[in-house]
């Protein structure tokens, strides 16, 4: 699992919640806004050990009938969410705050599996002349656990995947 895949999972969760979310810095230019949009970007990632020497223990693989070793990393992630709202009667500056409220609700109730939202914040609303829209920047700080598996027969680690929270 790549960091890009975690960002995509967050985009998908926001979209499922009815929030128009796009990857920040998409190819091509953004068209004139007719409704609010949120540009999501991974701002930082800081990986640390989830356990001693990253070792989490063993699990039985029923399909292969072998014991597998689990290794993991705890990753602290920070996402920027740039919210843009068109300067219309229906949206305007208030559209930014309404979208942030929707994002906060979605992050608290339907964040991607394995991604724990620790905090989120929203800055002031201002007018962006280049976009001809109102803008505010929000930030979400999250924790994820990435796990990889290795078997006794094959000492190489397989791809890391996003897992649920450790208890």
Image: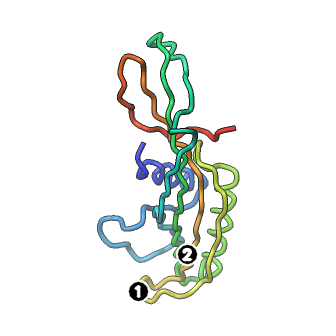
Point 54% across, 83% down: residue: 134
Q: Residue furthest left?
A: 28
Residue 153, quarter of picture: top left
Q: Position of residue 25 (x, y in %)?
A: 37, 68
Query: Between marks 1 and 2, how big is the CA–CA gap?
Result: 16 Å
Q: Mark 2 falls on what kind of element?
A: strand
Please name whichever residue, 165 or 33, is drawn nearer the observer in this view of the structure: 165
* Image mark for residue 64: none
Pointer 1: residues within 10 angstroms few (<14), some, or many (20+)? few
Question: Considering depth in this image, is 92 or 114 the residue closer to the camera?
Answer: 114
Task: Classify the position of the N terminus by image quarter.
Answer: top left
Q: Residue drawn 62% across and 83% down?
A: 124
Residue 64 sits in which quadrant? Answer: top left
Q: In the rendered view, does 4 fall on the left or right side of 14?
A: left
Please name the colour scheme applied to the rendered image: rainbow
Give the mark nearer the N terminus: 1 vs 2. 1
Whether 30 is drawn above or below 130: the answer is above
Which residue is identified by label 1?
130
Above or below: residue 83 compared with residue 74:
below
Residue at disc 1, secondary structure:
loop
Counting from the top left corner in percent of width and height, residue 97 is at: 65, 75
Q: Is residue 165 above or below residue 83?
A: above
For the point 37% across and 25% down, the residue is 155
Location of mark 2 (residue)? 137
Specify few, some or many for label 2: CA neighbours under 10 Å numbering under 14, 14-19, or 20 or more.
Answer: some
What percent of the width, then of the height, locates residue 61?
A: 50, 17
Q: How many marks?
A: 2
Which quarter of the image is occupied by the C terminus?
A: top right
- In the picture as drawn, the residue positioned furthest to the top comes out as 65
Q: Residue at x 60, y 83 (%)?
A: 125
Closer to the camera in the image, 109 or 56: 56
> Nearer the viewer's eye, disc 1 or disc 2?
2
């Amino acid at each position: 699992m790549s960091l890009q895949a975690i960002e995509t999972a967050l985009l998908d969760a926001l979209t499922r919640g009815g929030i128009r979310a796009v990857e920040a810095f998409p190819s091509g230019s953004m068209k004139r806004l007719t409704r609010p949009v949120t540009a999501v970007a991974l701002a930082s990632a800081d990986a640390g050990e989830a356990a001693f020497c990253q070792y989490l223990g063993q699990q039985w693989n029923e399909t292969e009938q072998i014991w597998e070793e689990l290794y993991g990393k705890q990753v602290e992630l920070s996402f920027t969410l740039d919210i843009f709202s068109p300067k219309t009667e229906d949206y305007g500056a208030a559209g930014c705050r309404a979208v942030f409220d929707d994002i906060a609700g979605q992050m608290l109730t339907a964040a991607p599996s394995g991604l724990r939202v620790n905090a989120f914040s929203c800055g002031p609303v201002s007018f962006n002349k280049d976009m001809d829209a109102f803008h505010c920047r929000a930030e979400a700080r999250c924790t994820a656990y990435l796990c990889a598996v290795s078997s006794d027969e094959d000492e190489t680690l397989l791809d890391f995947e996003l897992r649920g929270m450790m208890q």
